[in-house]
Amino acid sequence: GGHIINFPYLMPGENHIIVETPESTHFESGYYEHHFNVSKEESQTNAIIQKNDVRYTIIEVKVTNYHSTNAVDGGRIEIVNTATNEIVGSGQLDSQGNTNITTSIKQTGTYDLRVDFKGNEIYNPSSKELTVTVNRINTYTFVSTYNQTIGYTGVRVMVKETDHHFTVR
C-alpha cells in the first residue's frame, strides 16, 4: 500500500524529504531520500491612475495570484519611468495585495511607466506598463466688486482649485 502526504507550506527552492520505515517482523527497515524543487507562484500586477496632476500623481496597484486572483500578501512595488529608468515611486503591498503610491512626477507631460512587483518568498515578480498624462491643476476664477462708489470701488479676484476649493495664492 501507499500513503499520500501533502506538504502545503514548503518554501520555494530546493527541498528534500527523508522517509524511513522501521523494521518489523515481516519487513526490513527502509530509507529513502528525495530531492525536488518547489516553484514560486506566478503573480499578476494591475495598476490604475487615481490622480494625475502636478501636485499628486497617484497610482493604485493590486497584485494577485495569476491563476486564482487571490491577493498577494506583501512585497515591494517600484514605479519606473521607462524613458529615464528612474524609480519615481515605491511602496509595500498590504495583506490584501494593494497599495497606493504617490509618484515624484511634478511636471506636466506624458510618461510611460512600468509598475514592478519585485516578488516575495512565495510569488515571482511581475510588471504592468502604464501611460500617464500629468496635467496642470484645474482652477476657476471668481470676480466680485464691493463699495461701488467713485474712488472707493474694490475688485476682489479669487482663483481656486476645482477639486479641493483651495485658494491659489
Image (cartoon, rainbow, N blue to C red):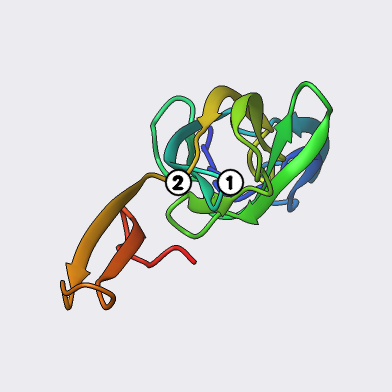
Q: Which residue is mark 1?
A: 7
Q: Which residue is mark 2?
A: 137
Q: Position of residue 39 (x, y in %)?
A: 69, 30
Q: Tag 1: Cα neighbours inside 10 Å, few (<14), some, or many (≥20)?
A: few
- Inspect the image, locate mark 1, and give the three-letter code of the amino acid beneath it: Phe
Badge 2 marks a residue whose secondary structure is: loop
Residue 25 lies, with reference to residue 3, above or below; the image says: below
Which of the 4 image quadrants contains residue 51?
top left
Q: Which of disc 2 and disc 1 is earlier in sequence?
A: 1
Residue sitting nearer the eye, 29 or 158: 158
Which of the 4 image quadrants contains residue 160?
bottom left
Badge 1 marks a residue whose secondary structure is: loop
- Inspect the image, locate mark 2, and give the three-letter code of the amino acid beneath it: Ile
Is 56 situated left or right of 151 in this image? Answer: right
Name the mark on residue 55.
none
- Residue that appears at 20% across and 67% down: 145
How far is disc 1 from disc 2 in space, using C-alphas?
A: 55 Å
Q: Tag 2: Cα neighbours inside 10 Å, few (<14), some, or many (≥20)?
A: some
Residue 140 lies, with reference to residue 43, above or below; the image says: below
Q: Position of residue 52 (x, y in %)?
A: 48, 40
